[in-house]
Image (spheres, rainbow, N blue to C red):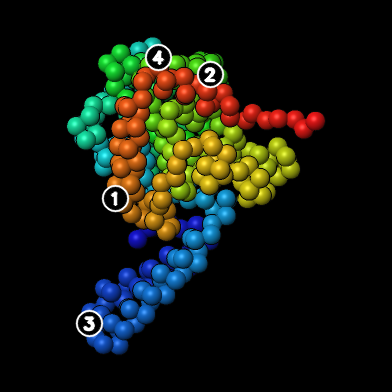
Amino acid sequence: MPKFAFEFERPVVELEAHLEELKKSPLASKTDIALDIKYFERELEKLKLKVYSDLSPWEKVLLARHPERPRTLDYIRLIFSDFTELHGDRNFRDDPAIVGGLCYIDHQKIVVLGHQKGKNAKDNIARNFGMPHPEGYHKALRLMKLAEKFDLPVISFIDTPGAFPGVAAEERGQALAIAKNIMEMSQVNTPIIVVLIGEGGSGGALALGVGDKVFMLENAYYSVISPEGCASILWKDGSKAPEAAKVLKLTSENLLEYGIIDGIIDEPLGGAHRDIDLVAYKLRNTLLGALKELKNIPLETVIQSRYQRFRKIGAFQEKP
C-alpha cells in the first residue's frame, strides 16, 4: 500500500489502511470479520474506480510527481539485463540527474538513458530532483553518439520538472546544451525510442525527447512549462495551477490526439507505483514492438521521418 497520498486520493488510502488492519487481525478468520473484509474489498474497488477513472489534468500532474512513482533505474532493473552504467561527460563532471549505459533487452544490446529522481529527501538532493546541469545533457549525448558508433538502438526515459535553472548551470551553457542535444538527436544515425514515465518539463525534457517513437505512461505529462509557472505568468497567481494544467493540454490523451506521441501505456488505477511489475511488463512489450518495427525500416528513412515529425509539431494554417 502506498505510504503517501494526495488529498484527492486520501479516501482510497484510508480505506486500504482499514482493510489491511482487518486482514491482520487475529479474528480475521471469524465469519463476521471475513464478511466485513469481503465487503470492504468490494467497496474499495468501487472507490478506486470513482476516484481514479476520471482524473483531471492537475490530478494527473500530481500522480506524475508521486514520490513513490517508479524512476528510470527502476525500469532499467525490471526490463533490461546486464546494465553497465557509464559516467561523466568527459569534460566537467558526472551529473547524477541523468543515468545511462549499456544493457540488453531480449538478447538485443542497446543504450538506455534517462532522468533520475530520488524517492526520498536524501536521494532527491543527490539527484538534484531530476533536474540536469549542462554536463548531464553532455553525458546523454555522449551515450547516444556511442550507440551510433556501434549501431545500437537508444531508449530514452524522460522524468524531469525541467533543466536546472541555477546560475552555475547557466554559466556553463545550459541553453546551448539543450539546443545541441535537440539538434544532434534529430540526426543520430540509430533508432531512438522515447518514453515519458513521469514529468516532462520544457526543454529539460525535450533534450532527451527527440525520437522515432515517443510513448507516454498514462499519468505522465509533457509540457512547455509547469502548471505553476504558467499560472504565475498568465494570472500572477500560482494557485491557479489546476486551471493552467487544463489549458496546457499536457496529458497523454491530449498529446496522442495532437500526434505528438505514438501511444499510451496504461497504468493501474492509482498510478504506476501501485503495480510496478505490471507497468514494466507493458512497457517492455511496447519497447520490443517498437524496436522490431524500426528494425524493418531503412535507417535513412527512419532519420528523415524523425526530422519531419518534429518539424511539423505546432504547424498551423491561417484561415483566409
Q: Residue 200, image x and y in percent?
A: 50, 37
Q: Residue 44, image x and y in percent?
A: 41, 71
The label on residue 29 is 3
Callout 4 amino acid = Phe
First reached walking from the N terminus: tag 4 or tag 1: 4
Q: Residue 239, image x and y in percent?
A: 66, 49
- C-alpha span from label 3 to label 4: 62 Å
> Can you say which quadrant of the picture contains the C terminus?
top right
User: Element at badge 2?
Assistant: helix
- Which residue has dot 4 on it? 92
- C-alpha span from label 1 to label 2: 35 Å
Residue located at (32% from left, 78% from top): 37
Q: Residues within 10 Å of mark 1 (few under 14, many from 20)?
A: some
Position of 309 relative to 231 (above/below): above
Residue located at (53% from left, 16% from top): 176
First reached walking from the N terminus: tag 3 or tag 1: 3
First reached walking from the N terminus: tag 3 or tag 2: 3
**Looking at this rendering, what residue extends furthest in the top direction?**
91
Depth-wise, is mark 3 or mark 2 nearer the camera? 2
Callout 3 amino acid = Ser
- Which residue has dot 1 on it? 277
- Describe residue 238's horizontal placement relative to residue 270 as left or right: right
Callout 1 amino acid = Asp
- Which residue has dot 2 on it? 179
